[in-house]
Amino acid sequence: MKAELYLYFTNRKFIIHLLHKHRMKKIEAIIRPHKLDEVREALQEAGFRGLTVTEVKGYGRQMGHSEIYRGSEYTINFLPKVKIEIVCSNETADKAIDIIIKKAKTGEVGDGKIFVLPVEEVIRVRTEETGDSAL
């Protein structure tokens, strides 16, 4: 792992910033629940072996919606979504992102978001393998 050390002067304090060159990415995608199987199958076919799925609720630009039940109107602020988490190498991250976009996209407001984060290390608990071999 390469690292660069930056030292700079701000407000009479020395601040040290350590910038790591990460080899792996964590992709977090919030998508519509009915798109989960399509996305999961496409990721498996592309060779992505591991995936974590969590049922979540939230809102973005959709801001929820209103429903009428037995003559009364109810506002639903938090909409059900699914969060998919994948950790992969930097080289395969773009491929995973492209698959998620292609399979989860409907073209409507509420399709979701994808967040990409650097991952410093991965350790397989059973064997104590680290890095790409632990994925």
Image (spheres, rainbow, N blue to C red):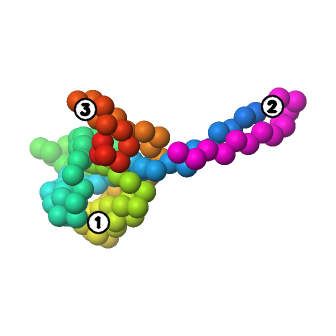
Q: For numbered disc 2, what is the local secondary structure?
A: strand
Residue 86 x, y percent position in the rendering: 31, 49
Residue, disc 1: 99
Q: Is residue 77 magenta?
A: no
Q: Amino acid at mark 1?
A: Ile
Q: Amino acid at mark 2?
A: Phe
Q: For numbered disc 1, what is the local secondary structure?
A: helix
The residue depicted at 27 percent of the width and 30 percent of the height is 125
Q: Are circles 2 and 3 on residues that touch, CB within 8 Å?
A: no
Q: Nearer the viewer, mark 2 or mark 1?
A: 2
Residue 97 x, y percent position in the rendering: 36, 62
- Of callouts 3 and 1, which one flags the residue occurring earlier in the amino acid sequence? 1
Q: Residue furthest left?
A: 70
Q: Give the camera-side residue of 47 and 54.
A: 47
Q: Are circles 2 and 1 on residues that touch, CB within 8 Å?
A: no
Q: Give the camera-side residue of 125 and 15.
A: 125
Q: Nearer the viewer, mark 2 or mark 3?
A: 3
Residue 87 x, y percent position in the rendering: 34, 48
Label 3 Cα neighbours within 10 Å, binned few <14 / some 14-19 / many ≥20: few
For the record, the magenta segment spans: 1-14
Q: Magenta span: helix, strand or loop, mainly?
A: strand
Disc number for residue 29: none
The residue depicted at 29 percent of the width and 35 percent of the height is 124
Disc number for residue 14: 2
Residue, disc 3: 127
